[in-house]
Image (tube, rainbow, N blue to C red):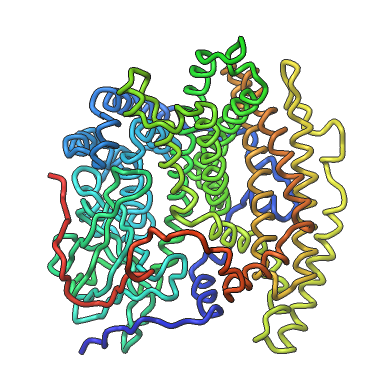
């Protein structure tokens, strides 16, 4: 007899945190450069010399990039995709024939078997032609069916689904619900066991690729019952199964060509053989998949940075103001320098993180998250600066520019397209909390019981003893280090540009970051998790230090290969100088900020104390609930699912 359908979960804040904590990887089996950085240990040996791909990986990767470039230049009409808000079927079918659906899939299943490095280079290339195509391919392979099956699927599942994913079947990942975002403890979609099947009921929102997908990875909650552990569980679901309805194709500010929708499940039968992993492991599978899956997003930001630099260079040479090209005016030149230096650093972060993922020698859960965080934030700023450099033309659409006889430069589109990256795959605010949790993991491991209100006095006493031993060894190492020695990292010098002071800065400020974190934990203890402003700044500092390290190491790699080494050193130097200003400001804001007064204002706003400030306007918003009702049941809407054939 099957278990009864689940009711919508109601959870406390503590219960939600427990669900998230249970899903994260608890152990550190491999070294992590970023984890060490947050602990005040600058382990340059983990990233230098810069790891490099094998000759065979380079050969296969470059061979595919050449084919993909030709396809993008001859078959992709970016203006048409933006105008029609849809990728033409013939383009998607062309990508299938090219093998683009199987870039990360092992050749034994019909894929190309590209490394993470070349997969990201391919996404950057195709994303520069059309960001919507980049999203289609990355949603399919980075978080769709191929990645979780690669890591957690059975041999039988891989043999059944991966050949299809590599050639014809588009996949999507379904976690978010209308009332559930980054709080999966409240997941309402149910998967009720019934014989050899599970019966799915629920509604999923923002299903990227969901409108055209053939296969879905669906996260649903299995009720606990006899013989069933229950919990959030992952399933591979065929989209032509009876009871699945794509109820809406969503439209957005940017990325107008993406196939993103609302998907309803009503009494959808899924074979138990389609379950990925054990019951209750779905959230862990999702988070583990995202560890490397998030690297596809920095790839799009790097592509946007490269294009922004090209347009800024060409436009700023052609446009004159007050007797000289605008590039030679300091106000504009500073923006161009920022775009150039930041593009170099973000590509350094992306390539370093990707190569470490390929080698599998390091745990890159923090590196991948930091790459996503800093790329999405700085990528958006680069696009914004490009619009400013272009002036009124930056605000004008490419179509309008072409209509009056000027070059159709879609600067405003890039700004719109990039904006979602600060929300996609974990918003900046959620990334701050996720990374902060990993950054303080060592502290919570030895001293967590001291601040846990549910722990007994005996547990607290034991934790106190363990913490005393740990901190007695750790704290003295934060006082002095190699960053205080003038000759350290002297090999990072060429052509009059010396990067060693920047690496010494990173080493010193990694220790300062660790001291600041320890002081905050001592001060706030159990309330530390509520200090989101402080934690966000701690993480942002770590992201900047990581990016500075990656930029220096990449510059040295290019110098050693005689590949624009002098210029790479110049760009790394510029980025580090810009980054150090941001880091110094963030350290100041750790303790000198408006967090307290902001909380008071928020209380006033929510209590209605400032409603008078809202007077004098009209609200153009339409009628309707803030969050659509998502009660399970049969669909009452037309199915807009549109498989590509």
474 or 484: nearer the viewer: 484
Question: 462 above or below 403?
Answer: below
Give the side of residue 29 with respect to residue 472, left or right. Answer: left
In the rendered image, the quadrant that contains the N terminus is: bottom left
169 or 393: nearer the viewer: 393
Q: Is residue 39 visible?
A: yes
Point 79% across, 70% down: residue: 523
Point 75% across, 72% down: residue: 524
Extreme-top residue of the structure: 323
Question: 176 above or below 191?
Answer: above
283 or 265: nearer the viewer: 265
In the rendered image, the quadrant that contains the C terminus is: top left
Give the side of residue 514 with respect to residue 179, left or right. Answer: right
When asked about the image quadrant of residue 188, the answer is bottom left
408 or 72: nearer the viewer: 408
Question: 445 above or below 348?
Answer: below
The image shows residue 243 at horizontal and vertical percentages of 15, 69
Question: Number of marks in the image?
Answer: 0
When asked about the image quadrant of residue 550, the answer is top right
The image shows residue 569 at horizontal and vertical percentages of 66, 23
Question: 574 above or below 485?
Answer: above
Point 46% across, 61% down: residue: 287
Q: Is residue 556 visible?
A: no
């Amino acid at each position: 007899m099957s278990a009864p359908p689940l009711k919508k979960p109601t959870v406390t804040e503590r219960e939600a945190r427990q669900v998230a904590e249970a899903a994260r990887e608890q152990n550190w089996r491999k070294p992590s450069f970023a984890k060490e950085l947050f602990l005040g240990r600058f382990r340059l040996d983990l990233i230098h010399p810069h790891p490099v791909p094998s000759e065979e990986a380079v050969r296969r990767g470059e061979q595919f990039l050449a084919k993909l470039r030709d396809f993008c230049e001859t078959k992709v009409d970016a203006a048409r995709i933006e105008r029609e808000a849809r990728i033409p079927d013939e383009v998607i079918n062309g990508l299938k024939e090219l093998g683009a659906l199987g870039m990360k899939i092992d050749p034994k299943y019909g894929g190309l078997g590209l490394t993470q490095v070349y997969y990201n280079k391919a996404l950057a290339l195709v994303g520069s032609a059309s960001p919507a195509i980049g999203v289609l391919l990355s949603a399919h392979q980075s978080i769709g069916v191929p990645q979780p099956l690669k890591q957690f699927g059975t041999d039988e599942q891989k043999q059944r689904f991966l050949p299809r994913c590599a050639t014809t079947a588009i996949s999507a990942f379904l976690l978010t619900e209308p009332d559930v975002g980054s709080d999966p403890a409240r997941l309402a979609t149910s998967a009720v066991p019934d014989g050899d099947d599970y019966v799915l009921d629920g509604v999923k929102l923002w299903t990227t690729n969901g409108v055209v997908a053939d296969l879905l990875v669906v996260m649903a909650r299995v009720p606990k019952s006899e013989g069933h552990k229950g919990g959030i569980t992952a399933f591979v679901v065929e989209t032509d199964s009876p009871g699945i309805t794509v109820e809406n194709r969503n439209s957005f500010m940017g990325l107008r060509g993406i196939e993103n929708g609302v998907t309803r499940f009503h009494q959808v039968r899924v074979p138990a053989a389609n379950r990925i992993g054990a019951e209750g492991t779905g959230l862990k599978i999702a988070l583990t998949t995202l560890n490397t899956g998030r690297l596809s997003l920095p790839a799009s930001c790097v592509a946007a940075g490269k294009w922004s630099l090209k347009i800024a260079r060409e436009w700023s040479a052609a446009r004159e103001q007050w007797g000289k090209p605008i590039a030679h005016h300091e106000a504009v030149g500073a923006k161009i320098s920022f775009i150039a230096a930041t593009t170099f650093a973000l590509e350094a972060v992306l390539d370093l993180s990707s190569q470490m993922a390929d080698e599998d020698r390091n745990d890159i859960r923090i590196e991948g998250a930091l790459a996503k965080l800093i790329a999405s934030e700085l990528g958006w700023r680069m696009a914004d600066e490009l619009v400013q450099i272009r002036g009124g033309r930056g605000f004008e659409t490419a179509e309008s520019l072409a209509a009056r006889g000027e070059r159709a430069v879609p600067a405003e589109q890039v700004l719109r397209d990039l904006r979602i990256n600060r929300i996609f795959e974990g918003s900046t605010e959620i990334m701050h909390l996720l990374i902060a949790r990993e950054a303080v993991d060592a502290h919570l491991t030895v001293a967590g019981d001291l601040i846990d209100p549910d722990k007994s006095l005996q547990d607290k006493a034991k934790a106190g003893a363990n913490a005393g031993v740990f901190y007695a060894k750790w704290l003295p190492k934060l006082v002095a280090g190699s960053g205080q020695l003038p000759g350290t990292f002297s090999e990072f010098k060429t052509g009059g540009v010396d990067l060693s002071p920047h690496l010494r800065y990173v080493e010193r400020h990694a220790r300062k970051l660790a001291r600041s974190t320890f002081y905050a934990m001592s001060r706030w203890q159990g309330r530390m998790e509520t200090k989101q402003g402080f934690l966000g700044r701690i993480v942002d500092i770590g992201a900047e230090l990581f990016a500075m390290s990656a930029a220096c190491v990449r510059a040295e790699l290019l110098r050693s290969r005689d590949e624009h080494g002098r210029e790479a050193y110049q760009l790394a130097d510029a980025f580090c100088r810009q980054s150090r200003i941001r880091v110094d400001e963030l350290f100041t804001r750790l303790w000198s900020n408006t967090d307290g007064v902001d909380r008071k204002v928020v209380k006033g706003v929510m209590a209605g104390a400032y409603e008078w400030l809202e007077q004098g306007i009209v609200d153009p918003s339409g009628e309707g609930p803030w969050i659509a009702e998502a009660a399970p049941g049969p669909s009452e809407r037309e199915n807009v699912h549109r498989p590509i054939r």
